Amino acid sequence: MDIKINILNKKLELIQWLSTIEDATIIEKIMDLGKKESKDWWNSISESEKESIEKGLKDADSGKLNPHSNARKLYEKWL
């Protein structure tokens, strides 16, 4: 819990500092850093998950889709 509070405090300090910046160059550098640090979820999933997604996209592109109503019927007991 202490770590979460410490991180929250640092975020608040950062927000306060950001609100005082008037130099566009510094703001752009911070924005660039944020873009570089953002993780693409695609890189964090397993190969089988990627294959499943790719198969689903191929099926959708070729028209192999089922209406939502069919999916609800099929999975009704879990909904």
Image (tube, helix red, strand yellow):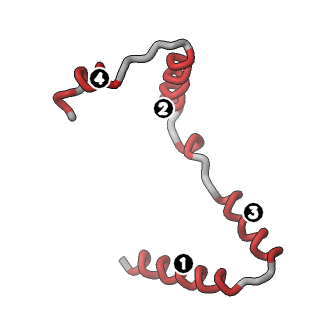
Number of on-image labels: 4
Mark 1 or 2, which is nearer the eye? 1
Mark 3 Cα-neighbour bin, 10 Å: few <14, some 14–19, many ≥20: few
Check if mark 3's residue and mark 2's residue have beta carbons within 8 Å.
no
Q: Looking at the rendered structure, which numbered label has been put on residue 69?
A: 4
In this view, 28 is above or below 69: below
Mark toward the start of the polypeptide (1 vs 4): 1
| Residue ID for mark 2 | 49
Q: Identify the residue shown where x is 76% and y is 83%.
A: 22
Check if mark 4's residue and mark 3's residue have beta carbons within 8 Å.
no
Mark 3 or 2, which is nearer the eye? 3
- In front: 72, or 75? 72
Which quarter shows the N terminus?
A: bottom left
Q: Position of residue 10 (x, y in %)?
A: 54, 81
Amino acid type of the residue that numbered disc 4 sits on in the rendered structure? Ser
- Distance in Å between CA atoms under marks 3 and 1: 18 Å
Looking at the rendered structure, the secondary structure element under dot 4 is: helix
In this view, 8 is above or below 45: below
| Residue ID for mark 3 | 32
